[in-house]
Amino acid sequence: MEIIQLKTADQYDITITLFEPKNSVQKLLLVNSATGVKQQTYYDFAQYFADNGYTVITYDYRGISLSKPQKMKGFEASMRIWGNTDYKTVTDFIQQKYAHYRKFVVGHSVGALILGMNPDSEIFEKCCFVATQNTYFGHLKTKVKFLGLLGFGLYQPIITQLKGYFETQLVNLGESLPKGVSDDWRTLIIHKKSINKLLEKTPDYSKNLTQEVLYLNMEDDEWITDKGMKLLMNTTYSNMKTTYRTIEVSESTGEPIGHINFFRARHFQLWKIVLDWFL
């Protein structure tokens, strides 16, 4: 495991972690994180693939964990910058160093949504989406719909105005976020066009993607709905070839999986689903 800093086009340092296998099968896997989720969350998952011969890269978008600035207030970042600059920096690195490898990507939550912001997403032979969707609150289940409206209709605007960034610990939404990132997240929740609204504000390459994608959702993930998943694939990634797979809690330890825990080591037996998809 090697920690490396990459310089983005706008001269910001983002931190990646590189997992190299002992016996390479000349395949590379990139993991695009969920919003506010540290890359360390994916380390066990990454090591599993490295043990199976893959070179694996995890990374933190600017404003998160190892790519966090000293001061969050006033720090410029957005989900669009995550997609068109930070993610693009990583794919540039991949093409420079691993040009002849077969390449695959796992996009977790927003990590799948940003694929359409980077023309290099076409380099990946196959994709796997985990716990993602068109996140407009009108498609959410009743309890989560209320939390989404309360959190992004009231709490987020007030907190970001007061602090200059989005302090998320009180609402259990992961790492605190730069204001611009939370504003984009608010758009995903509040605006009916959701991710398609963000794509109007950055070059949109979503329709260029034609790969096969394995779309995983967890039966106990309260945030994800069938309508939200189908809208994402029908209106955003409409040229991709999708295989949907619902993972039952009983397929693993019986412990909750939810929105994040698919990548925890206690559910490692589920990872073979992704490994087999990338064969």
Image (cartoon, rainbow, N blue to C red):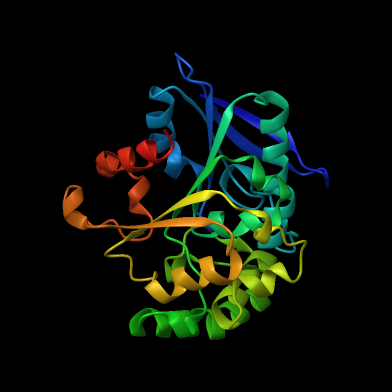
Residue at 72%, 57% (x, y): give it. Answer: 81
Residue 143 pos. (x, y %): 34, 82
Quadrant of the rendering where the C terminus is positioned: top left
Place of residue 111 in the rendered image (x, y in percent of width and height, measured from the top left) = 55, 54
Q: Position of residue 244 (x, y in %)?
A: 38, 59
Quarter of the image holding residue 264? top left
Total label count?
A: 0
* Residue projecting furthest to the right: 10
Q: Position of residue 273 (x, y in %)?
A: 32, 42
Q: Is residue 137 left or right of residue 165?
A: left
Q: Is residue 105 something one can see in this rendering?
A: yes
Which image quadrant is residue 207 in? bottom right
Q: Nearer the viewer, residue 140 or 182?
A: 140
Observer able to see residue 164: no
Q: Residue 80 lies in what quarter of the image?
A: bottom right
Residue that sits furthest to the top in the current view? 23
- Is 131 situated above or below 265? below
Q: Residue at x 19, y 54 (%)?
A: 255
Residue 239 in the figure: left or right of residue 197: left
Q: Residue at x 59, y 45 (%)?
A: 60
Q: Is residue 160 above or below residue 101?
A: below
**Which one is in front, 279 or 162?**
279
Q: Nearer the viewer, residue 112 or 154?
A: 112
- Is 53 displayed left or right of 191 in the figure? left
